[in-house]
Amino acid sequence: MKKYTDTGKKDTRSGFGDGLTELGRKNPNVVALCADLVGSLKMQDFIDENPERFFQVGIAEANMIGMSAGLTIGGKIPFAGTFANFATGRVYDQIRQSVAYSNKNVKICASHSGVTLGEDGATHQILEDIGLMKMLPGMTVINTCDYNQTKAATIAIADHVGPVYLRFGRPKVANFTPEDQNFEIGKAVQLFEGNDVTIIATGHLVWEAIQAAEKLSEKGISAEVINIHTIKPLDSEAILKSAKRTGCVVTAEEHNFLGGLGESVARTLAENHPTPQEFVATQDTFGESGTPEQLFAKYGLNAEAIIKATEKVLKRK
């Protein structure tokens, strides 16, 4: 079994900030907007190097989305950053009407997603945002797993024409994907080959899936692990190819099981190759205050939960 090494824990939001800074040096059309959260989104380096290409809109997220849509008309590529809760739930109407409906080239960059926002609690955590964004026609939805992948995705979406929702997080997590990776929108990454079960994970749950697969291997269970960084468009071909080989699937995500990655995978399987599936996700609930580790344990979003789901789905084959 291939080994993945944590090269040093980093927060994915820093991957976004460093990717944005690199873009600022390469692409003069890239501009950045922020709703009074520059420090939280690690945007200061971009601002220092490109002060004329940054717009601080204050706590006015709806205006930020409207301004971003307008900037695209002049050929700019706006990266609009704030917390995921404010980037989606607070401004859904503006995103739908001003960005998605007219297919504007806006990059909505959402930090502090999921329960790993931690101690700030349920009002700032959001577990519905993937569902909200993937239902918008033409919206690309990306949920990255570590610092390196977030940096690569940030750079890649500048070349993609059309609206993008890029989701990342606050805590320092394992950094294990290649530094020089080629990020391809809509293309899944197979981490392990296996024959008994397919584990499909996204975001912070990818590292947990790796840990689960290693422990399952010790029990004689061969798990195939797939990193789905792009939830829309979904790499259905990779999912179906794996499901046909293993005969059962576990999906893992830091999101409500309603509307997230698991639901998209279930639809793909139902339409093409019905397969037993178990969901590792929050179960139609809001979050609460606590450390990321405490909340992952409480809501069943860790390697242990993935192992239990695997053992359950194997009985359904």
Image (tube, grey):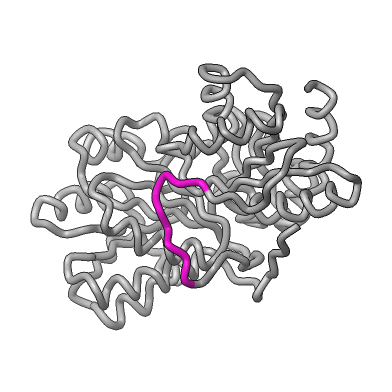
Residue name at image x 28 percent, y 39 percent: 94
Name the residue located 18 percent from the left edge and 36 percent from the top edge: 102
Provide residue 311's location: percent of width, then percent of height. 84, 34
Q: Which range of residues does the magenta coloring cover?
A: 180-188
Q: Main secondary structure of the magenta part?
A: loop
Q: Quadrant of the C terminus?
A: top right
Q: What residue lies at 62% left-to-right and 36% top-to-bottom?
A: 242
Of 230 and 30, which appears nearest the observer? 230
| Residue at the far bottom in the pictured view | 48
| Quarter of the image where the N terminus is located | bottom right
State left or right for residue 2 relative to residue 253. right
Decide which of 131, 44 is in the foreground and name it: 131
Q: Is residue 277 left or right of residue 188?
A: right
Can residue 279 be seen in the rendering of this structure? no
| x then y, percent, for residue 265 | 56, 30
Rendered position, 175 above or below 145: below
Q: Quadrant of residue 170?
A: bottom right
Please check the rendered image and state whether residue 28 is part of the magenta-colored stretch, yes or no.
no
* Residue 51 image offset from top left, x and y in percent: 23, 78
Nearer to the camera, 166 or 52: 166
Q: Is residue 175 above or below residue 277?
A: below
